[in-house]
Image: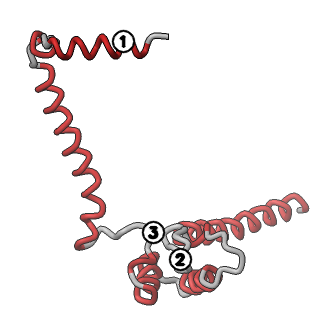
């Protein structure tokens, strides 16, 4: 009987900690999707200002929104309505915000394409053109002066 009570206690303890881990994980997930509005440009849960006027209140608002059993997007929408879209750590995938996701990749692809074209053109330059010597007596005279001035 004693063994059965111990097993029930361990099982109940495991169930109680299971719920708190998911709540804590959800808080961490949502907190890292929001920015602190104090002007520090840091993620809400990583704002390290002592006595920050914004982060403590926003954390309490986040906990209150989660306590209302709103969906993740519902909680984030409340923050966007109150603080504006600048409160989001990453742009959404709706409307014009898609450009913020697409532009870096498009720029990278365009840059790689241009580098490829330039390298191909450089590879086809004839060797005699690339290593052509300039036979100019004035230039040779200047080279002699430079060699003379730079000798130790």
Q: Residue at x 40, y 88 (%)?
A: 81
Residue furthest toward the bottom? 82
Picture quadrant of residue 66: bottom right
Any part of residue 110 in sight: yes
Of badges 2 and 1, the one in the foreground is: 1
Of badges 3 and 2, the one in the foreground is: 2
Query: Badge 2 is on which residue?
Result: 39
For label 2, the crowd category at 10 Å Cα-Cα, with few meaning under 14, some 14 to 19 and many 20 or more, is few
Q: In terms of secondary structure, where does tag 3 sit? A: loop
Residue 55 placement, left or right of 3: left
Query: Badge 1 is on which residue?
Result: 147
> Could you tell me residue 21's position as x and y percent?
65, 66
- The quadrant in which the N terminus is found is bottom right
Which circle's residue, 1 or 3, is located before the other in the chain?
3
Disc sitting over residue 89 in the figure: 3
Q: Residue at x 54, y 85 (%)?
A: 65
Q: CA distance from mark 2 to mark 1?
A: 58 Å
Residue 51 placement, left or right of 138: right
> Could you tell me residue 118's position as x and y percent?
15, 32
């Amino acid at each position: 009987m004693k063994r059965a009570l111990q097993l029930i206690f361990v099982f109940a303890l495991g169930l109680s900690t299971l719920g708190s881990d998911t709540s804590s994980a959800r808080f961490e997930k949502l907190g890292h999707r929001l920015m602190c509005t104090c002007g520090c440009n840091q993620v809400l849960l990583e704002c390290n200002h002592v006595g920050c006027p914004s982060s403590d209140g926003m954390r309490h608002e986040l906990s209150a929104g989660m306590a209302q059993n709103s969906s993740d997007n519902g909680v984030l929408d409340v923050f966007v309505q109150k603080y504006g879209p600048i409160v989001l750590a990453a742009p959404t995938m709706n409307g014009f915000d898609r450009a913020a996701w697409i532009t870096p990749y498009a720029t990278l692809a365009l840059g790689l394409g241009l580098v490829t074209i330039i390298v191909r053109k450089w590879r086809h330059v004839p060797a005699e053109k690339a290593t052509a010597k300039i036979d100019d007596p004035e230039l040779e005279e200047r080279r002699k002066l430079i060699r003379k001035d730079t000798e130790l």
